[in-house]
Image (cartoon, rainbow, N blue to C red):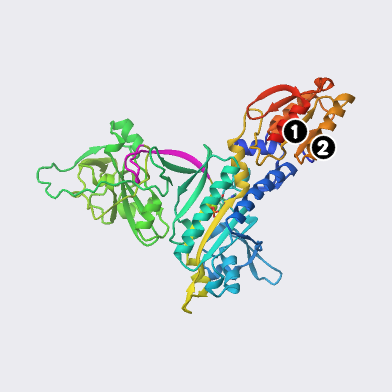
């Protein structure tokens, strides 16, 4: 491709709303352009990278025995009502009507469509197992579209779905996908971790893993063991509990003592004003799940894990109680609530249950209590793991290592769905004995556009992007220093034709621009190898620049060709 013909404009500066480096660089280097919030055009350079990613994904999916299909983005709302997700999916679901006022949605994912498809096609165990996949635009009305392609409202996803006669079959399909995902991310040059994840809104009781691109800007926190290969999303990471036997004889202990703590409603305020260490405090938080109002106790230096609490309370969504409700349930505002005397169900985190005594709110404005004893001053009937794991916690798997935390961007997700959708939508098959059984399903997603920006986020320097060669838009960038110099132009053209004839994807910067502009743009665009054709071309020499290593070397043109072919 000759750059003089390329539909590309580079920008000196990124628009102010681009906060993350990948978003800034992809805009500046002309890979993407925004149409609306979370909605982007892929310019020729961006489309090329996307195609390479798609190709890697296709090769690995085909290799894992999955068959490519393409399902409609436009989906009848009835299907979503059948699966009972029409309302549950919430505002992210884009809804619309046709001219006959029939309701449709723009697919955010395809469990419904694929399950309905397979139920109509397959009725016997003989046709199973089956795994299908597609690469397609998805639509989600995200509350906060963010960071360019990282969280779009229209974005490209690879989604795959497996159908089996039983759980053993699903285990196998899952394992194959898991392995394929590892190969995909490795081939894309991504630094990633596979972590145990929470089931979340897709439903299903099965095991699932997220593939996380490691990055400081990631919205997810992952807990990783320093010694074994345990890795889990913070939402999911268990905390190893010591079993606590509640003490029964408290006769020797003093009663709690009330002390004055005006305007000390937070852990920080108690620490600053009264010199109390957070780990001496027992935090009391009032939650509601719509039906029940209840309290959760965690140590002052710990955080409630709402998902763990939610599970313990039976699964429905929980929220922190608002001011009014706290007043009603506890008789005081939230900073001064304590568990003593509360007539609510009290969930006690195991770390709190293990404390000899602690400091809590007094249930009275401007006062706290010292010497509150678990098991005496509040019941230990609902003790469990209700907090987030914290850095330095013992690993729940091996026990000897410690947990450390990293930020991650979720680029992929593999999920054992089981029979949730097949039961709701009636995707059944006849087994060997002629009995009707629901198919056992798995689903497997990769955010391809999110993957593109995750790789960009991990691979750049002050000048711009640095693509791994497997997904770079071009393999080689020829920089013709002076387009007006006949000899230079001839040498660059000859080199371009030669490389192209070997099937090497080459971008020739043949524009009539200053050398400085060309270097700047090349640095921004990030093609792995640049060949600078300048004055030296008269002696058959050029400058070979390795973008990643940041090295420059003057070598013979022939040697440069051989080197590039070698890569
Ligand atoms: P998140 O927690 O980031 O919202 P999710 O759990 O909603 O992700 P899934 O429903 O599992 O995501 O979708 C499969 C994959 O699609 C994700 O692993 C992610 O890579 C990608 N993805 C999800 N939402 C978006 C989005 N808004 N923009 C780009 N990619 C996305
Ligand atoms: Mg989401």
**Residue at the disc numbered 1:** 477
Quarter holding the C terminus? top right
59 left or right of 310 in image: right
Report x, y in % for residue 306. 39, 51
* Gap in angstroms between the C-alphas marked 1 and 2: 10 Å
Outermost residue toward the bottom in this view:
434
Measured along the vertical axis of the image, is residue 317 above or below residue 559? below
Our reading of the magenta stretch's main secondary structure is loop
User: Residue 518 falls in which quadrant of the image?
Assistant: top right
Q: Quick check: 484 above or below 117? A: above
Looking at this view, is 561 or 53 the one in front? 561
- Describe residue 385's horizontal placement relative to residue 452 as left or right: left
Give the residue pinned by disc 2. 2
Q: Would residue 320 be visible to someone looking at this image?
A: no
The residue lying at 23 percent from left, 44 percent from top is 354
Question: In the image, residue 298 lies at what x, y percent?
Answer: 31, 45
Quadrant location, the N terminus: top right
In the rendered view, does 320 fall on the left or right side of 101?
left
Q: Which residues are magenta?
A: 392-409
| Cβ of mark 2 under 8 A from ligand 1 | no
* Residue sitting nearer the eye, 106 or 178: 178
Identify which residue is drawn at 38% across, 57% down: 311
- Disc 1 element: strand
């Amino acid at each position: 491709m000759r750059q003089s013909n390329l539909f590309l404009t580079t920008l000196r500066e990124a628009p102010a709303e681009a906060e993350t480096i990948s978003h800034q660089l992809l805009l500046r280097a002309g890979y993407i352009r925004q149409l609306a919030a979370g909605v982007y055009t892929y310019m020729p350079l961006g489309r090329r990278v996307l195609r390479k990613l798609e190709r890697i994904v296709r090769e690995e999916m085909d290799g894992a025995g999955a068959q490519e299909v393409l399902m409609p983005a436009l989906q009848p709302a009835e299907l979503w009502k059948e699966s009972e997700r029409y309302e549950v999916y919430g505002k992210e679901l884009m809804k619309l009507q046709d001219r006959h006022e029939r309701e449709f949605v723009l697919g955010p994912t395809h469990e419904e469509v694929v399950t309905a498809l397979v139920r109509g096609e397959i009725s016997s165990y003989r046709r199973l197992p089956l795994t299908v996949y597609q690469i397609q635009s998805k639509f989600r009305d995200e509350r906060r579209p963010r960071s360019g392609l990282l969280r779009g409202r229209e974005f490209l996803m690879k989604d795959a779905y497996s159908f089996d006669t039983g759980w053993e079959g699903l285990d196998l399909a899952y394992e194959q996908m898991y392995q394929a995902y590892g190969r995909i991310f490795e081939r894309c040059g991504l630094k990633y971790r596979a972590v145990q994840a929470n089931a979340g809104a897709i439903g299903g009781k099965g095991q699932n893993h997220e593939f996380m691109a490691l990055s400081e800007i990631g919205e997810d926190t992952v807990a990783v063991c320093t010694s074994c290969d345990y890795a889990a999303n913070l939402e999911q990471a268990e905390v190893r509990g010591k079993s606590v036997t509640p003490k029964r004889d408290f006769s020797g202990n003093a009663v709690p003592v009330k002390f004055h703590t005006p305007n000390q409603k937070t852990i920080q305020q108690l620490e600053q004003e009264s010199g109390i260490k957070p780990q001496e405090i027992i935090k009391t938080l009032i939650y509601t799940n719509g039906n029940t109002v209840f309290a959760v106790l965690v140590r002052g230096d710990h955080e409630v894990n709402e998902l763990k609490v939610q599970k313990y309370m039976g699964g429905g969504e929980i929220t922190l109680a608002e001011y009014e409700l706290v007043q009603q349930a506890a008789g005081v505002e939230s900073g001064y609530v304590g568990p003593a005397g509360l007539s609510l169900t009290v969930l006690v985190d195991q770390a709190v249950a293990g404390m000899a005594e602690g400091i809590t709110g007094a249930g009275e404005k401007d006062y706290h209590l010292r010497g509150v004893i678990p098991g005496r001053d509040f019941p230990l009937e609902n003790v469990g793991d209700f907090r987030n794991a914290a850095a330095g916690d013992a690993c729940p798997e091996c026990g000897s290592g410690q947990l450390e935390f990293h930020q991650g961007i979720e680029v992929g997700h593999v999920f054992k769905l089981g029979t949730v959708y097949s039961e709701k939508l009636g995707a059944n098959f006849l087994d060997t004995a002629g009995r009707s059984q629901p198919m056992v399903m798995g689903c497997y997603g990769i955010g391809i556009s999110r993957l593109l920006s995750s790789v960009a986020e991990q691979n750049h320097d002050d000048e711009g992007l640095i693509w791994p060669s497997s997904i770079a838009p071009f393999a080689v960038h020829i920089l013709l220093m002076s387009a007006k110099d006949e000899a230079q132009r001839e040498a660059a053209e000859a080199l371009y034709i030669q490389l192209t004839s070997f099937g090497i994807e080459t971008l020739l910067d043949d524009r009539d621009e200053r050398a400085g502009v060309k270097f700047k743009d090349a640095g921004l665009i990030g093609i792995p190898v640049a060949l600078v054709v300048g004055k030296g071309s008269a002696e058959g020499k050029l400058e070979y620049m390795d973008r990643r290593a940041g090295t420059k070397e003057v070598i013979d043109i022939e040697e440069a060709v051989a080197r590039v072919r070698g890569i």
